[in-house]
């Protein structure tokens, strides 16, 4: 896509690419990166738990946890130790194998997403040339784990909650995938490393509508506020975590934050320019951007109330899905018609289109058989 | 229903929350920092002055819970009643302060303490000279303005958290 | 071939994070939709009406604090008004002004909790309730300055109030009145126009006018349904006829209207407090009434506009030191009888929200 690779805009000319089998052969590369990914995920998830509790506390005019360790930094460690010492209770009539396997099936796909995310130029575990397709496919497997948890607990409330979860994840896959397709069309490749290299201007400016749709859809997929009706205590107890205790509960908790980490990594890579940035080393830019995206998620969680299950479905099918389709069509038209056009003009055009579409669609959006007008 | 406001309501809410990130939190880190309680606090343990008490038992009659028990005997030398034993069950006391209000001789005061947990239930029943005023057992100014005038001012959250117009 | 479904019964039990107190509901659900609801209460019954027959008239005042424990001053005031009607006692003027200031401050405090927990039930993860509890702490500091305690004040007496205001009260009240409207505006900005809240609460749980009047609902629940009825204007007690204030009324009777009516009532209360503070006189705060009062034989009903509705005390006296019979008309109980009509056809998540918008307190319902 020549518009993005315009030579006058190339700010990061001389970043050396790390070879595909650094440091020495295939198996060493695999080992080093596996260790890096596991360490990255575990440490950053703990950091996320800390950031969420602290930032949410300060936004609510109180302090977050600040007793364990300096500034409360060891709080997630204390939580982890506590949860490991708890008794593991399994209901009598539960389906034992399903109940035991569910957290594992829910957790591993999330770890596997990180295999294609570039931390630096070429620093990926496996630079697949179908990167985005791999990500989308793998992330759907953890839904199976969630459903297994709901079924295996022998409890009608968890079953309701698991079915809702499956329904909402399936509905939100489509707008998410379509907005990703918009990015792929502009960048010309599905490999995540190539997409980052192709972003002289961050993709968020070219695809503002796509970014919004992806962000909202991803928030719904990982069941975070304002879509966290599955863990709400407005429902009858805690949703699918009800019958889990001890380390299995810790795994579900970890899954929730690891999915948030995965989504923020994907958003950073695809829309915000990955590891690109002027002065600091690239992996530091990656960390900063990932934490910034998570901070926005925490901010949204602190402010907004929850929406109901039927409103959730209506939002997916009547609001996000048509907008995603229109976004894809317009992007395709732009790529065909203005292949070498001025980037700034295109940015403005895209922003204008996004504003008009959102306004128009909000006027037309009706919920629940058109009861009372707001 | 239509989203006629297309997202501006959400944006306004987000603006409010982010401003709080830059304000000082109002938490008081107990037990290292404590707030000064009111001058008229109706604390847990009562304070009794043996020299002023005449054993009229107005406090015992007024108490809604029946917490105070007074035993008197005649003192033939002064031809007056002496209080032989006074027993107050602070486990039953609801801290209403009616006994303090009604005492005609200013012999009874509310206490200022609020952290009076004990390990055994028997220790909640307090008698005679444990009820005298001391450094641990300060008298509060409820229904006694002269005591209230000597106590420190209360910390108010209003002063700590001011909002500029 | 159609799928056979049958409704199932779920017990939303007494221990639950979202019911306001120990309240149990047996709901019959058909899928997600609520078909029937049976409320079961009585888990907090303490026999307060019977205890009244064994305490003196003044000794019962601390027990009335514990009825609706979130608005103690109003309970005290209603009871004391009933006794004053029975014993024909006059109240000095400074005491009347102090009573009005306390009652209106208490209304603001109670509505803060009501609005905060409504928004918490809607799912906003504690943020609105934390902000509102902070404002309530400021009011509780003022109450602590006057009466010595923060929740059960025991401040009103037969014939006035128990003690005079300390001299730092009125400057602190000035400070509070200056800042509170700014904070209410901030809460409006936070959540009043939020689309998610509007989608969750507009049109949900509608209580129409006839039903509201038929079940004897009162307070914000009645006013949100469009009925302009406030005891402070319809049957003025104390000195409310000297103040100028509006009565906010809703149009639809849905959850959003109840929330909106409460926020507007907070603003009107601040207006009343300002006027009372400007007009306050000096003088005694308690008329010469003995501690053990023996009213003549008769009966009296004293009622006020409590934050939750019409709170009334019906006292029968037989010229002894304790009432012969005391009956308490609890507003939350009567508002709750409308719950079944409001809830039919809505989903479980709405059930919690509608229940939260009625704003009950179990201490009153079970007595």
Image (cartoon, helix red, strand yellow):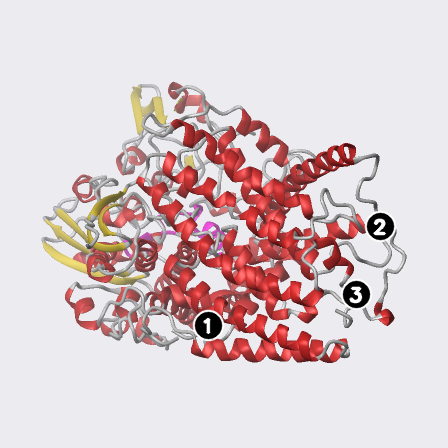
Q: Residue at left 25%, top 44%?
A: C10
- Residue A286, compared with residue B31, is above or below; it is below
Query: Label 2 vs label 1: CA separation?
Result: 77 Å
Mark 2 and mark 1, same subunit?
no
In the figure, residue C93 lies in which quadrant? bottom left
Q: Measured from the top left, where is residue A188 in percent x and y?
A: 70, 64
Chain identity of mark 2: A
Q: Are marks 2 and 3 in contact (CB under 8 Å)?
A: no
The mark closer to the camera, 3 or 1, is 3
Q: Is residue C88 visible?
A: no
> What residue sits 24% from the left and 55% below the top?
C34
The crowding category of the residue bearing disc 1, from other C-alpha atoms within 10 Å (few below 14, some 14 to 19, many at least 20), is few
Asked if marks 2 and 1 touch (Cβ < 8 Å), the reply is no
> Which residue is labeled 1 in the image?
C278
Between B51 and C66, the one lying in front of the other is C66
Q: Is residue A176 above or below residue B60?
A: below
- Residue C155 is covered by the magenta coloring: yes
Quarter of the picture holding the N terminus of chain A? bottom right
Q: In terms of secondary structure, where does tag 3 sit?
A: loop
Q: Residues in magenta? A: C137-162
- Which residue matches tag 2? A17
Please, what secondary structure does the residue beneath circle 1 have?
Answer: helix
Residue C79: say if magenta.
Answer: no
Q: Identify the chain of the residue marked 1, using the numbered disc in the image.
A: C
Farthest right residue in view = A14
């Amino acid at each position: 896509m020549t518009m993005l690779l315009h030579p006058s805009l190339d700010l990061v000319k001389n970043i050396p690419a790390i070879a595909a089998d650094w440091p020495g052969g295939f198996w060493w590369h695999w080992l080093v990166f596996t260790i890096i990914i596991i360490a990255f995920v575990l440490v950053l998830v703990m950091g996320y738990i800390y950031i969420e509790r602290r930032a949410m506390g300060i936004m609510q005019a109180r302090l977050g946890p600040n007793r364990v360790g300096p500034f409360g930094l060891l709080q997630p460690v204390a939580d982890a130790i506590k949860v490991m010492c708890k008794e593991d209770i399994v209901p009598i009539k539960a389906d034992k194998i399903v109940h035991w396997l569910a957290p594992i099936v829910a957790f591993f796909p999330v770890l596997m997403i990180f295999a294609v995310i570039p931390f630096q130029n070429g620093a990926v575990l496996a630079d697949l040339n179908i990167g985005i397709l791999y990500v989308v496919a793998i992330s759907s497997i953890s839904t199976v784990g969630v459903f297994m948890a709901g079924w295996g607990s022998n409890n009608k409330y968890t079953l309701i909650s698991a079915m809702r979860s499956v329904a909402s994840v399936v509905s939100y896959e489509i707008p998410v995938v379509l907005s990703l397709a918009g990015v792929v069309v502009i960048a010309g490749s599905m490999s995540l490393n190539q997409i980052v290299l192709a972003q002289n201007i961050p993709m968020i400016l070219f695809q503002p509508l796509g970014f919004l749709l992806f962000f909202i859809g991803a928030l719904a997929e990982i069941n975070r506020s304002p879509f966290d009706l599955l863990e709400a205590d407005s429902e009858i107890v805690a949703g699918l975590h009800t019958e889990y205790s001890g380390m299995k509960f810790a795994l579900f908790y970890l899954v929730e934050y690891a999915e948030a980490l995965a989504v923020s990594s994907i958003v950073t890579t695809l829309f915000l320019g990955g590891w690109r940035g002027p002065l600091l080393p690239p992996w530091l830019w990656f960390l900063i951007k990932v934490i910034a995206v998570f901070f926005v998620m925490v901010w949204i969680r602190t402010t907004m109330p929850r929406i109901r299950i039927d409103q959730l479905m209506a939002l997916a099918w009547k609001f996000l899905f048509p907008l995603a389709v229109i976004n894809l069509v317009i992007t395709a038209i732009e790529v065909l018609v203005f292949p070498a056009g001025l980037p700034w003009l295109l940015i403005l055009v895209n922003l204008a289109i996004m504003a008009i579409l959102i306004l128009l669609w909000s006027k037309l959006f009706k919920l629940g058989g058109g009861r009372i007008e707001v | 229903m239509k989203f006629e406001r297309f997202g501006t309501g959400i944006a306004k809410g987000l603006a409010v929350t982010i401003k709080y990130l830059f304000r000082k939190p109002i938490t008081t880190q107990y037990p290292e920092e404590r707030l000064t309680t009111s001058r008229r606090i109706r604390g847990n343990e009562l304070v009794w002055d043996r020299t002023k008490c005449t054993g009229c038992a107005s406090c015992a009659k007024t108490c809604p819970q029946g917490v105070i028990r007074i035993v008197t005997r005649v003192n033939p030398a002064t031809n007056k009643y002496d209080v032989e034993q006074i027993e107050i069950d602070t486990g039953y006391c609801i801290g209403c302060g009616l006994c303090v209000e009604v005492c005609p001789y200013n012999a009874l005061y509310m206490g200022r303490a609020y952290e009076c947990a004990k390990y055994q239930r028997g220790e909640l029943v307090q008698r005679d000279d444990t009820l005298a005023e001391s450094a641990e057992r300060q008298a509060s100014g409820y229904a006694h303005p002269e005591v209230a005038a000597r106590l420190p001012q209360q910390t108010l959250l209003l002063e700590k958290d001011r909002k500029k117009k | 071939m159609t799928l056979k479904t049958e409704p199932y019964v779920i017990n939303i039990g007494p221990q639950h994070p979202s019911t306001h107190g120990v309240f149990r509901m047996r709901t019959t659900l058909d899928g997600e939709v609520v078909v029937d609801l049976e409320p079961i209460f009585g888990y907090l019954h303490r026999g307060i009406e019977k205890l009244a027959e064994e305490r003196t008239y003044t000794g019962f005042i601390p027990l009335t604090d514990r009825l609706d424990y979130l608005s103690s001053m109003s309970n005290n005031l209603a009871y004391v008004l009933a006794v004053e009607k029975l014993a024909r006692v006059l109240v000095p003027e400074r005491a009347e002004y102090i009573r009005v200031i306390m009652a209106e401050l208490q209304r603001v405090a109670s509505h803060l909790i009501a609005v905060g927990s409504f928004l918490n039930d809607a799912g906003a993860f504690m943020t609105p309730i934390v902000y509102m509890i902070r404002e309530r702490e400021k009011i509780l500091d003022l109450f602590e300055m006057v009466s010595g305690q923060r929740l059960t004040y025991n401040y009103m007496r037969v014939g006035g109030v128990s003690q005079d205001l300390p001299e730092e009260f009125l400057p602190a009240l000035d400070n509070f009145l200056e800042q509170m409207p700014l904070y209410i505006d901030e809460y409006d900005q936070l959540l009043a126009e939020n689309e998610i809240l509007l989608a969750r609460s507009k049109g949900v749980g509608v209580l129409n006018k006839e039903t509201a009047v038929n079940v004897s609902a009162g307070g914000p629940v009645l006013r949100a349904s469009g009925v302009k009825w406030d005891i402070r204007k319809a049957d003025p007690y104390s000195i409310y006829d000297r103040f100028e204030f509006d009565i906010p009324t809703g149009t639809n009777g849905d959850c959003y209207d109840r929330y909106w009516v409460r926020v507007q009532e907070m603003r009107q209360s601040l207006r009343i407090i300002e006027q009372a503070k400007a007009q306050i006189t000096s003088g005694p705060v308690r008329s010469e009434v003995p501690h053990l009062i023996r009213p003549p034989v008769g009966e009296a009903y004293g009622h006020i506009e409590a934050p939750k509705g019409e709170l009334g005390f019906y006292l029968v006296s037989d010229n002894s030191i304790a009432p012969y019979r005391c009956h308490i008309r609890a507003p939350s109980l009567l508002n709750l009888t409308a719950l079944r009509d409001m809830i039919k056809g809505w989903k479980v998540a709405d059930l919690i929200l509608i229940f939260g918008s009625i704003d009950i307190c179990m201490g009153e319902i079970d007595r």
